Image (tube, rainbow, N blue to C red):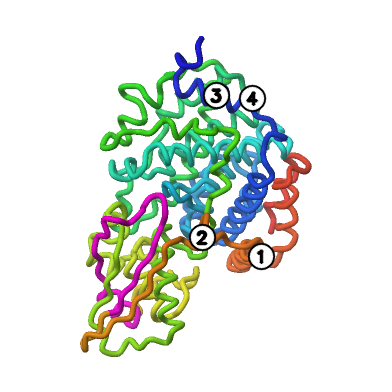
Amino acid sequence: MNENDKTISQRLSRWAVSMEPEDLPQPAVEKIRDILVDIVGLCIAARNEDYIEATKAAAEPGDQVIIGHPDRVSPSSAALINGTAAHGEDFDDTFEGGPVHSGVVMVPALLAAAQTHGLTNDRVVLGMATGAELLCRLALTLPKGVHKAGFHPTAVLGVFGATLGICSACRASEEVTANALGIAGSMASGIIEYLGDGSWTKRMHPGWAAQSALRAYAMAQAGFIGPKAVFEGTHGVFNVFASSIEPRPEQLFKELGTRWVTETIALKPYPCGSMIQPYIDCAIQLKQRRVSLEGLEAVVCKTAEGIVHRLWEPLELKRQPPTAYAAKFSTPFGIALGLIRGQAGLQDYSEAAIRDNNLLTISRLVDFEIDPDDPYPDVFTGHVRLVYANGRCEEVEQGFVRGGMEHPLSRQEIDDKFRANVAFGRSDEAERVLEVCEQIGYQQGDYRLIKALANV
């Protein structure tokens, strides 16, 4: 068959099965190392939370590792729990160009696949990299479209990335890989109705995608057939999950294998929505300038139209979030944290914080105006303008997200974040676990190292 006659899933499959660990450029390996460290730390940070206890209660028995727990569960349950824990505090990586979270899907999926299929860690890292690459490129293919349709892009697109990653790691054939992607299309899901009341379902989306990818691969390997035009077909992903836009499938194949967009994945400095991060930075800068909040009449922020329905509206709900989790998706609350506390850590997104009158007094003043020139989703920006009753203004603008392409976190900052998250999860074994993550991330050993991530 001529390459031009192949479907998108067939072309992606050909690329994925041709990849070998030595084909990964060192910057991609380094990024996967950092993502793995970040995700493991986040899983430990969340291990005592109520939503993890609830997810564990629904698990099936088995012999696979839950990060930070002595329990053993089935592969799909491990992927679900680890993915839920990693994304639970919204402190995981993101991607400029389309706000998707790669590590929370790829790490749980590939760790489970490694234990199921006895993989060496060079294959595990390869799977994480190829899976993240597809997820990020799918986000570039469907800019803003999935969110506009009411779905969570990480959930919907993540299952395809994880499926491709597992197939690549397990040396699946082109046919099996294409079928697995087709099967994954019927498992893609994840609505964003949690935004309306601060409920928990966003937390489980990456884990659901990870466990679905395991199932899609297993079914395809056993001979189950999936639709080859799962992406571009009449009833495929592009038309169903992003019908309001014209897809850009060229983004999937532009310099594929030679330019790794995975290398540009951003690691977050704050545990909240990706596009809120630069607004918090702006607010903290104003706090550091010691600007007075006396006589403050309004806080006005320029913003991108594409994030309003998730992070700004309904405005009254965002000004006074109903739950600590809802506060993570409130730009007004994030700005209030920056202006009042000069920080926004895990401890600041609490039930006590959302009842703090000092914070609420400020968040109730925050409003927004659409900036038609905002570059979202290619770049995440921030802007905070304080307006006083006497007409005076104080203003800060930031044209980047800290941790992203232009201003990445340093290795020291990433490892310190890991240490802080492990301590938050009430463990004193950060250095030992970090060493294990380094061994896995730098492709040493095999699946047996994963067991060392359990009892911490």
Per the model, the C-alpha gap separating discs 1 and 2 is 14 Å
Vertical side of 86 occupied by 18: above or below = above
Range shown magenta: 357-386
Q: Residue at x 35, y 88 (%)?
A: 292
Check residue 18 in the rendering and tell me which mark sits there, or answer none: 4
Residue 184 as seen in the image, left or right of residue 321 = right
Q: Which mark is residue 268?
A: 2
Q: Amino acid at mark 2?
A: Lys
Q: CA distance from mark 4 to mark 3?
A: 8 Å
Question: In the rendered structure, which amino acid carries the disc numbered 1?
Answer: Gln
Disc 4 packing (10 Å; few <14; some 14–19; many ≥20): few
Picture coordinates of residue 293 (x, y %)? 32, 86
Answer left or right for 389 relative to 102: left
Which of the marked residues, 2 or 3, is nearer the chain's N terminus? 3
- Is 336 situated left or right of 257 in this image? left
**Which numbered disc, 1 or 3, marks the residue that appears first in the sequence?**
3
Q: Tell me whether the residue at label 2 lies in contact with that at label 3, contact meaning CB atoms closer than 8 angstroms.
A: no
Amino acid at dot 3: Ser
Quadrant of the rendered structure where residue 435 is? bottom right
Considering only vertical position in the picture, is 327 above or below 352? above
Q: Residue at x 27, y 69 (%)?
A: 319
Q: CA distance from mark 2 to mark 4?
A: 32 Å
Label 3: which secondary element = helix
Q: Which mark sits nearer the N-terminus, 1 or 4?
A: 4
Mark 1 vs mark 4, CA separation in Å: 34 Å
Residue bearing the label numbered 3: 13
Q: Which residue is mark 1?
A: 412
The x, y position of residue 99, in whole percent, is: 42, 49
> Are dots 1 and 3 in contact, CB under 8 Å?
no
